[in-house]
Image (tube, rainbow, N blue to C red):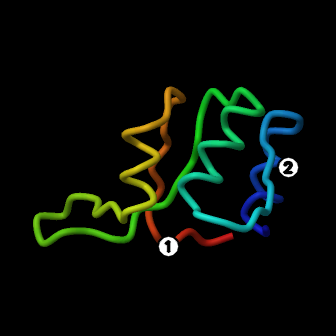
Amino acid sequence: WRLVEKVQERFPGRVSGVERAGDPASELLDVARQVRADTIAIGAHGQTAAGEAALGPVATRVLRSSSASILLAPAVIEC
């Protein structure tokens, strides 16, 4: 939640966060549809040997299933 709070400070009224239980990809996609999100920020697991972002199963499913823009963030973010 600390990251959400930091981003909300920088972009007031434009960023929201929710906490839900269930299948992560399904819940993310459901909330994005409900709030009509134009962008979904999601983290990558790390990097491949070639230095490319390595997507986990949740990020992959959201990327393939969402009509919103996807912002892929590095796995480690300092707040």
Which of marks 2 and 1 precedes in the sequence?
Answer: 2
Q: Which residue is mark 2?
A: 9
Question: Which label sits on residue 49?
Answer: none
Kindly identify the amino acid type of the residue bearing the numbered disc 2: Glu
Name the residue at 71% across, 26% down: 36
Q: Is residue 43 above or below residue 13?
A: below
Name the residue at 58% across, 62% down: 24
Inter-mark Cα distance, 1 to 2: 20 Å
Check disc 2 and report its element: helix, strand or loop.
helix
Q: Which residue is mark 1?
A: 76
Name the residue at 46% across, 69% down: 75
Name the residue at 78% across, 69% down: 2
Confirm or deny contact between disc 1 and disc 2 (CB under 8 A).
no
Q: Residues within 10 Å of mark 1 (few under 14, many from 20)?
A: few
Quadrant of residue 11 in the image? top right
* On-image quarter of the C terminus: bottom right
With 56 as the anchor, is 23 left or right in this view?
right
Q: Is residue 62 above or below residue 53?
A: above
Counting from the top left corner in percent of width and height, residue 21 is at 73, 68
Q: Is residue 42 above or below residue 31?
A: below
